[in-house]
Amino acid sequence: MNLHCLPLTLVAMTMALSSSFGQHLALELPVGYNGSQRTVHFFSFDSRKHDILIIDQEGISKQKYANLRIAMAKRNCIAGCNGASATASGSHEGLAVCDGKVISNTFSTANEQCAILATDGTNVRLEPSKEYLQSPLKNPEQLLQSGPLLISDGKTSAKLNAHSYKRRTFIIHDGGNKWAIAYSPACTLKTLAYTLSNHAKIPFKVETAVVLGEGSASGFWTKSQLAQPLYLRELRRSRSFIGIAEK
């Protein structure tokens, strides 16, 4: 939208909505094959104004919500994406807490570069799993173990795959109050990490970035107060969703 073409009152309203509602960004980034440009969707938000929800689907064969869009509507979310991967039996691959209830207490050792996203309603943390478990939140309301880490302490992770192209969802954090969930078309882990670390269009300097899901389970939805919702629909069922809701 070209704000220069709008009346000043509408421009002011648009800015106000963006600051309190969160912001959807569709950025052309060089994440495709041989550095080709692809549209990567971000929803940036402030953890002082928004909550992160882990929405459990209670399984794979039978699920609580038919899809991501319906789950977001039922939980009054303004944006969301698929959560971490599930095992062949439909259980969480790693630790998971939903609305204060422990869904999975199995620590994932499948990937040394896993991370934990956790919040107690006030504090929100995104850290390497082993680092988080040294000083965990006492009573997390929401928690999800996922991975791999793309960026940790502002540095790209070593040994990321540079050959496998898949759709991916991920979460980024500036180390303070700025966050974003995002969806990328087919890309490699190495290219995605490098782009998030170095490209000027990224909405803020990324301190930590973690993959949430990949492949056909990747989905992204965001509500808009000025346009129709955007829904990049998942093609395969996910065990959980991540939702962003206003406090």
Image (spheres, rainbow, N blue to C red):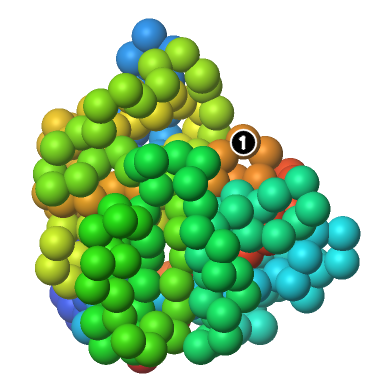
Image: 194 above or below 4: above
Residue 1 seen:
no
Give the image location of residue 84, x and y in percent: 55, 54
Q: Which residue is located at x 39 percent, y 28 percent?
A: 189
| Quarter of the figure that contains the C terminus | bottom left
Nearest the viewer among 134 and 186 is: 134
Kind of residue at badge 1:
Gly
Image: 120 above or below 80: below
Give the image location of residue 119, x and y in percent: 35, 79
Q: Which residue is located at x 50 percent, y 59 percent?
A: 107
Q: Which residue is located at x 63 percent, y 59 percent?
A: 92
What residue did someone put label 1 on? 215
Give the image location of residue 178, x and y in percent: 20, 66
Quarter of the image where one finds residue 240: bottom right
Give the image location of residue 216, x and y in percent: 67, 39
Horizontal arrangement in the rendering, residue 135 relative to residue 1 (left or right):
left
Horizontal arrangement in the rendering, residue 218 relative to residue 63 (left or right):
left
